[in-house]
Amino acid sequence: MKPRLSIPQPHRRGFLTAAAGLFGVSALGGCDRFAASPTGQRALKAGEDANLFVQRLLLTPASLAKEFPDSQISPWFKPNGTIDPPDRAYKALAAKRFQGFKLRVDGLVERPQDLSLADLRTLPARTQTTRHDCVEGWSAIGKWTGVPLSEVLQRAGLKPNARYIVFHCADTMEYAASEEPDEAEEKPTDKTANPGMESRPEGAENQASDSKAAGDEAPADVDEAAQGTPVRYYESIDLTDAFHPQTILAYDLNGQALPVSNGAPLRLRVERQLGYKQAKYVMRIEVTETLNGIGEGGGGYWEDRGYEWYAGI
């Protein structure tokens, strides 16, 4: 049975305070020095809280993002950020077409789960054709098929103090230095913390039959330990978005198995938020009461580096 959710609603006074803070920031004309100050950070956070309040005020939990006819599907869905995780464990899975993949579901759940792709494909599925809006300014329309996140969470059973769903991913964004500062500067590291958008190869189409999508590459023989402790991508949402009908763990894109470049074997789709919330290469789902202790406490890799946690559109 689907759990009944009790999501705290922002107080009217909190909204007015947040709106005032947002106005104050806009009146400053983008002063970097103020934005970097503690007062500026509080004002920016107030603006984010106002965005969340307005979104939740105007949209019911079941309000849907716009869906499109198949005729409007983009001929090429731009892969962005990490497009081929360098991690040895991931490459080993991809080389076997993810046959050994298990999605771990743990944390504040009654019944921890380890679900293979075959297990996930036996659960009820949803297909939706939606527009992906990137914070960098581009968009693309794709047809996603996957299991609603609510189905996975119901199978695991949430404990009463569950509040957030955290997604732990396979792609290493950077390495935490393990050498002395001077040594670390001399040694190049394999970072993708500031990835550029991938340009479309001539004649490329959004097909899952290329070698990367099929997992034909052998694992790279790389000494990851020598580079330091890997910091892998992480993201989070609250229960309102987790149980939204369009929030799915997608395993197909445009009727074919999800390509590696677009996040295979599983990619989160939370359609009412911007692209950086759509975590790729999902390996583990952790249910928590707080975001403290997840990265630096901001709720996601990019949020810990200044992005908003709630990226509603």
Image (cartoon, rainbow, N blue to C red):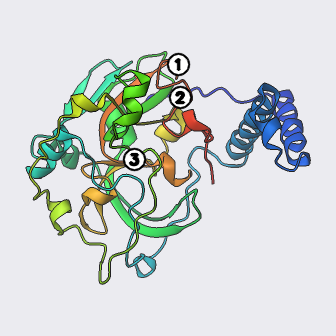
Tell me, yes or no, if residue 59 can be seen here.
yes
Crowdedness near tag 2: few (<14), some (14–19) or many (≥20) residues, C-alpha within 10 Å? few
Q: Which residue is mark 2?
A: 5
Dot 2 or dot 3: first in sequence order is 2
Residue found 82% across the figure and 27% down from its top: 39
Q: Amino acid at mark 3?
A: Thr
Q: Secondary structure at mark 1?
A: loop
Q: Could you say where residue 139 lies in the image, as x and y percent from the top left? A: 52, 67
In the picture, measured across the screen, residue 179 lies left or right of residue 258, that is: right
Residue found 32% across the figure and 17% down from its top: 110
Q: Give above or below for 90 relative to 64.
A: above
Q: Could you say where residue 205 lies in the image, as x and y percent from the top left? A: 30, 77
Tell me, yes or no, if residue 232 can be seen here.
no
Q: Which mark is residue 292?
A: 1
* Residue nearest the viewer, comparing 26 with 196: 196
Q: Could you say where residue 36 lies in the image, as x and y percent from the top left? A: 75, 34
Q: Which mark is residue 192?
A: 3
Q: Amino acid at mark 1?
A: Asn
The C terminus appears in which quarter of the rendering? bottom right
